[in-house]
Image (spheres, grey):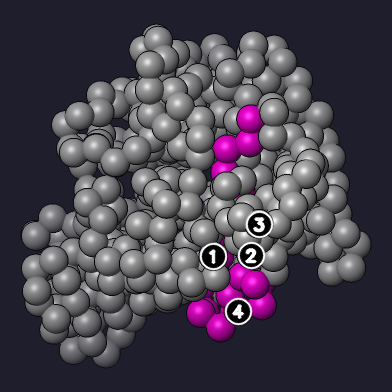
Amino acid sequence: MPSKLSAAALAGAATYCTSSALNAFVAPQASQRAQVTSQSAQSQQQGHAAAGPSPAHVGALAMGAVGVAACAAKLGKRASRSKVVRAAVKEFTKMPATVKPGVVTGQGLVDLLNYAKEKGFAIPGVNIVGTSSINACMEAAKKAGGPIMVTFSRGGGQFIAGKAADNTDDAACIAGSVAGALHCRAVAKLYGVPVILHTDHCQKAWLPWFDGMLKANEEYFEANGEPLFSSHMLDLSEEPLEENIAICKKYLERMAKVNLLLEMELGVTGGEEDGVDNSNVDSSRLYTQPEEVWEVYQALSSVPNGNFTVAAAFGNVHGVYAPGNVSLKPEILHNTQKFIKEKLGCASDKPVFFVFHGGSGSSTEDIQYAIKAGVIKMNID
């Protein structure tokens, strides 16, 4: 929804970096900031590079674009900020070899998500409404030296095409989303950071938009050996679980052939976004059960070359709220990981890639606890 999304991105990198939701998510505590700055100075004095980032530092400096600069700017310590940002860039150069500057797809994307899970951070997913907001996201990412997810909503895609454009069969939504993705591909490498090109909620009634983008991906793949976008989201949480899983599996089988990752949603994220209003939904639907995620995991894992993330509901709500007004239960994610690990008998404590929708209004502790449960992407309201 352009009027809402513009506030998040068009304000530019500096304003974007001061989001309270991001501060709660990524900003280190004062002692951590001092430790990072001190360690950076010591490393320079001793004339050797650090052995590698600790999970605590990566978690504090992560979400690629934003946390460090936001925190320092908030304190008004420009000199300190310079040191901390340099440290952040240094830390993020230790990404997997498959993760290059520019748009990341296929195995590179999977490796990046695994890296985020291993190091304990989540990548910011920011909805955009035009080339200016796309550039603002990448500029912020460049300043902090980390990855960013540029996200197109259906309404955002239509806004890029222009409200007067013919939108029969979602033609304008498709054209605008594709145009934005092509713009991002043309300039992303110039910012020197990994960029994930993603699309947001697509409910059942909007599948023509999804189909149109898949066609564009397939055509791009045929010409370039990789998809146009990195990933797409299907939000069929309003449908019965069996139907949700069946449709997601059908689309993932097609997406896997061109190395696209699927994000799917379980349960209901409260609040309102892109014209979908779940403000009055039964509160019980805001919390996903481990057994439901296991059903999804079984079905989608059976798809050859299929890669997917799960937006499981754990009390998160779309919209902008003051801290304390959202009742998160991230222990649901921890319990789900434990449940699936036991079912699989695997070594990994976090076999599922979780994503976090509706992050504002959540406490620092809840956000960080969610990340520890395998959240690798957090949407910014």
Answer with mark 1 or mark 3, whichever residue precedes in sequence: 1
Which residue is tagged 1? 130
- Residue type at the position of mark 1: Gly
* Residue that extends furthest to the right in the rendered view of this protein: 222
Q: Is residue 40 left or right of residue 54?
A: left
Q: Is residue 64 visible from the viewing direction of this image?
A: no
Residue at x-position 27% and y-position 66%: 15
Q: Is disc 1 in contact with disc 2, using a CB cutoff of under 8 Å?
A: yes
Of the two numbered discs 1 and 4 in the rendering, the one whose residue sits closer to the viewer? 1
Pick whichever of labels 3 and 2 is earlier in the sequence: 3
Work out whether residue 280 or residue 262 is closer to the camera in this orientation and state it.
280
Q: Is residue 202 magenta?
A: yes
Indicate the position of residue 245 as horizontal and vertical percent values: 69, 21
Front in this rendered view, residue 60 or 211? 211
Q: Give the CA distance from mark 3 to mark 2.
A: 17 Å
Instruction: Give the residue at mark 2.
Output: 180
Residue 311 placement (x, y as % from top left): 51, 32
Q: CA distance from mark 1 to mark 4?
A: 14 Å
- Residue range corresponding to the magenta coloring: 183-203
Asked whether residue 169 appears in the rendered view, the answer is yes
Distance from the alpha carbon under mark 3 to that under mark 4: 27 Å
Q: Earlier in the sequence, mark 1 or mark 4?
A: 1
Label 3 sits on residue: 164
